[in-house]
Amino acid sequence: MSCLDEFKEDWSYDDPSNWHERFPSARGNFQSPINIKLSQSVIQNYPPFTLSPKCKNRYLYTLKNDDHKLTVTLAKENKNKNQGDLWVRGGGLTGTFHFVNFHLHWGGHDTHGSEHELSGCRFPAEAHFIFKNLENQEMTIFAFFLNISGRFDDENTEWKKYADATSLLKNNGDKYNCIFYLSTLMPIEGNKFFRYIGSLTTPPCTEGIIWTIFYNVIPITEHSLNLLRNNVMRESCRPIQSINDRIIYRNFDR
Ligand SMILES: [Zn+2]
């Protein structure tokens, strides 16, 4: 038995329909991801988001292969010093939400890979940024769809770095430090987004998550997605869950 086995969480993308056996929340009525039907979403006037000015700065982050995805957190050496620098406010959120981590979900082929769907349309990948209100532990996830760009000069430079690092992150537990600009990874320009209440899309599938799904799509190349597929894992996305009685809001007209 390897020394990592005791830390390995007992779930995989081979059998998402069985996650509830070990993680009961996965069977709840407010699960994510969902299909966001644009025509059925309700217009709501949310104030714009404010990102902390330091989201534009460069910071050292640590990428880690956790056997399910590549999760990126602030590097240990500056975590205590800089954790308070990266936050979001506004957009209908109550209080200040601090950066926790970001990661990507992707599919084995370009025909799927995003966790959410937009009016039934699937994208090849979806980025998640987790933010937490440290006063009440509420969490919001900023999500962005990624789509294939045929042009290398059009690709988002920061997501290219994320994909390029995978050659050093092939095994569970592998880590690598890299500089990122959070505001470039997370282009909220235009501020068009959807809002609904759902869950984490990985076990324990905890509910009560405030989802913010941006309309702005991030360009990535096929080459970068192939690096993720070949170096880390073939695919990492949970199937669509029932909306049930939930209302999906949007803050834009069309
Ligand atoms: Zn995620």
Image (tube, rainbow, N blue to C red):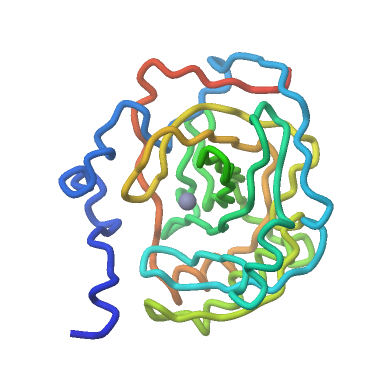
Q: Which residue in the rendered view is the most extreme toward the front? A: 135
Q: Position of residue 54 (x, y in %)?
A: 81, 57
Residue in the picture at 57% in, 65% down: 73
Residue drawn at (41%, 60%), measured in percent from left and top?
108
How far across and how far down the image is residue 106, in percent?
A: 47, 56
* Rendered-image quadrant of the C terminus: top right
Q: Residue at x 44, y 64 (%)?
A: 69
Pinpoint residue 127: horizontal percent, then vertical percent.
Answer: 57, 52
Rendered view: 232 above or below 26: below
The answer to whether residue 254 shows anywhere in this view is no
Give the image location of residue 170, x and y in percent.
Answer: 43, 80
Q: Is residue 49 left or right of residue 230?
A: right
Query: Tag count in the figure?
Result: 0
Residue plotted at (72% across, 17% down): 45
Can you say which quadrant of the picture contains the N terminus? bottom left
Position of 205 relative to 171 (above/below): above
Question: Is residue 241 in view from this perspective?
Answer: yes
